[in-house]
Amino acid sequence: MNTDARFELRDHTADVGIAAEGATLDSVFGALGDGLAAAQCDDIPDGGERFSFSLAAEGREALLFDYLDELIYERDVRSVLPVDNEVRIEADEEWRLEASSRGVPLADLEAREVKAVTYSEMRIEEHEEGWEAYVVLDV
């Protein structure tokens, strides 16, 4: 779990927003992944196996969208809730990330459905203190 970043769920019309801030862009992406899990489940049990994946995109907003979308995809394909998300990001000609998550079996929890991540109101900003981001989830 990210120790230098935090997230907050926010009501957003019929959807759910996640705001996150942290010292690094890596930690903010991980916190948004943890926020995605929290939007689906109130109490996350121990257990579950870690899994990893890699992504590449043309920009950081596209990478964030693809990252959260991949977590939803992994949830559906593996029947797990991805939690304790860790991310490493590199950027040069394209944006790349290496991510890992602990997959808690959906059978072990009561989860709400998040249908998709949206580009609506998405923002990622760097400040003197670090990074902050906001995304809206379609529930």
Image: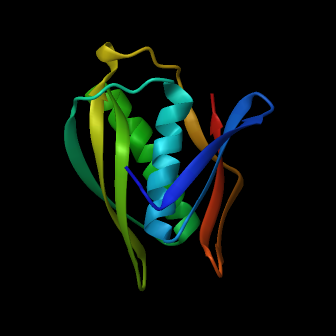
**Outermost residue, left direction?**
49
State the residue in front, 6 or 36. 6
Residue 14 falls in image quadrant: top right
On screen, residue 118 versus residue 50, left or right, reads right
Q: Residue at x 45, y 23 (%)?
A: 43
Q: Residue at x 28, y 34 (%)?
A: 103
Which colour assignment does the render follow? rainbow
Q: Position of residue 33 (x, y in %)?
A: 46, 47
On screen, residue 49 versus residue 16, left or right, reads left
State the residue in front, 61 or 46. 46
Residue 88 falls in image quadrant: bottom left
State the residue in front, 81 or 77. 81
**Outermost residue, bottom direction?**
92
Residue 56 falls in image quadrant: bottom left
Quarter of the rendering occupied by the C terminus: top right
Q: Position of residue 52 (x, y in %)?
A: 23, 51
Q: Residue at x 63, y 64 (%)?
A: 132
The relative height of residue 111 versus residue 117 in the rendered view (above or below) is above
Q: Residue at x 44, y 54 (%)?
A: 30
The relative height of residue 123 versus residue 43 in the rendered view (above or below) is below
